[in-house]
Amino acid sequence: MVQGQVIDFGEREIKARKMTTTGRGPSSLGFTNIGCPASAGGSKVEYCAQGSPLSLFQVTSSGESRPVSSRSPVGFQDASIGPKPPCSAANRSTFYVEKGSDNDADKPLLCVKDSKNNYYWIQLSMVP
């Protein structure tokens, strides 16, 4: 056990079944280099940060990369951090909000699949 010290592992890999943080204050995970690999490199899943502003992505061993927020089965997840992406299987069930300017209302959109396996952004209604 090492306490009260910083350990620099350099370019080495750390393998563990479980990692637990202890101590006072919040815990965090930091990414120095930004970007996501083409696949999870032998792991079942990896996490990476990319984009501007940064978003946390999950990359699977098959190479599928999606924002972590789009995988959440609960709550509204606004993925509108840049230009609206094409609606596809990779971002199905993702919300995107076209931000209105001045007196124009926002346009909430949802990526959905129809019965012929075509993907579309549909605009959701807003009820004041």
Image (cartoon, rainbow, N blue to C red):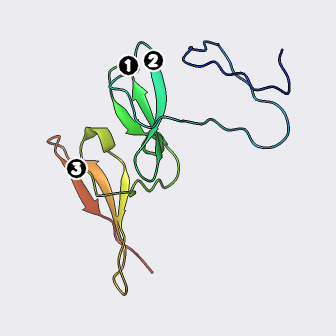
**Residue in the picture at 17% in, 40% down:** 117
The residue carrying mark 2 is 44
How many other residues sit within 10 Å of disc 1, few (<14), some (14-19) or many (≥20)?
some
Question: In the image, is residue 18 above or below residue 115?
Answer: above
Determine the residue located farthest toward the bottom in the rendered image: 103
- Secondary element at image label 2: loop
Label 3 – label 1 distance at C-alpha? 23 Å
Position of 96 relative to 114 (above/below):
below
Q: Between marks 1 and 2, how big is the CA–CA gap?
A: 5 Å
Q: Amino acid at mark 2?
A: Lys
Q: Position of residue 33 (x, y in %)?
A: 48, 34
Q: Callout 3: helix, strand or loop?
A: loop
| Residue 3 x, y percent position in the rendering | 85, 23
How far is mark 3 from mark 2, CA to CA? 26 Å
Task: Quickly name the residue at label 3.
Answer: 86
Q: Earlier in the sequence, mark 3 or mark 2?
A: 2
Residue that numbered label 1 is attached to: 61
**Camera-nearest residue between 8 and 98:** 8
Q: Do tag 1 and tag 2 residues touch (Cβ < 8 Å)?
A: yes
